[in-house]
Image: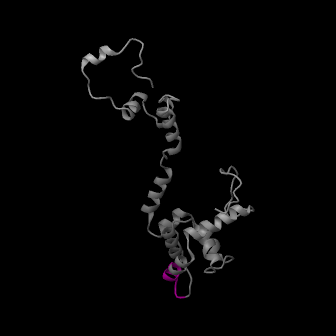
Amino acid sequence: MARDAQELVVESHVAPGRQKDLTEVRANVFASNLLMPAPEIRDRFRQVADRHGRLTVEAFSELVVAFKVSPSALSARLSQLRLIDAQSEIAAHYRGLTTEICHLLAGATDAFQRQLAWAAAQRFPVRLVAALYKCYAEGETTLRPLASLLGMDVDHLHDLLDPAEPDSPESDVGEVEEGDLIFQP
């Protein structure tokens, strides 16, 4: 969006919070504002903070769960908005928490398990499947690469994509000349 990306695919290891690349810093600021908008963070902070404007670990954990962000990302955002002191012992403690612990403290272990299952689920390679199907439809390849990618039997995939025509009279079978291809994958 800022028109300064150097590559479409990042092949370097990115250490959260330790980037020197301004493109990555700008991306993190954008993500922070998108996932944790200042008005919503301030409002929720006021709802869960104690009367002295401090967060308990449980209240912090509730915010992690509510905004679906990492504890370190939320701690950085709260510091940026000056809701907590970035140099304080409590900020360091918050940064050290794990997402799993925050869900446990917030009583949301079921939500954490759902997120883990979703993250571990095998993703359907939509663009690759579409490209292989297009090549098949245009006669540039067989169904074998697509079936292999999908982990399916070629014949079963063919039956799904090109269902057999309703039974035709037997007299039509005699019309096929020898050497004509009836089926070409």
- For the point 70% across and 61% down, the residue is 23
Is residue 47 highlighted in magenta?
Answer: yes
Does residue 93 appear left or right of residue 120 in this picture? right
Q: Indicate the quadrant containing the C terminus: top left, top right, bottom left or bottom right.
A: top left
Residue 96 seen in render? no
On the image, the x and y values in percent for residue 57 come to 54, 74
What is the image's colouring?
A: one colour
Position above or below: 164 against 1? above
Question: Looking at this view, is 23 or 78 the one in front?
Answer: 23
Position above or below: 11 against 175? below
Does residue 20 appear left or right of residue 53 in this picture? right
Give the quarter of the image for residue 108.
bottom left
Point out the residue furthest to the left here.
Answer: 169
Point out the residue furthest to the bottom here.
Answer: 51
- For the point 48% across and 66% down, the residue is 104
On the image, the x and y values in percent for residue 62 come to 49, 72
Question: Looking at this view, is 103 or 67 the one in front?
Answer: 67
Position above or below: 153 against 13? above
- For the point 56% across and 85% down, the residue is 53
Question: Looking at this view, is 138 or 159 the one in front?
Answer: 138
On the image, the x and y values in percent for residue 100 come to 52, 62
Instruction: Report the magenta residues as a range.
Output: 44-51
Point out the residue furthest to the top here.
Answer: 178
Residue 81 seen in render? yes
Give the quarter of the image for residue 162.
top left
Is residue 142 highlighted in magenta?
Answer: no
Point out the residue furthest to the right here.
Answer: 20
Does residue 157 appear left or right of residue 34 in this picture? left
On the image, the x and y values in percent for residue 109 come to 44, 63
Q: Indicate the quadrant containing the N terminus: top left, top right, bottom left or bottom right.
A: bottom right
User: Most prominent secondary structure in the magenta stretch?
Assistant: helix
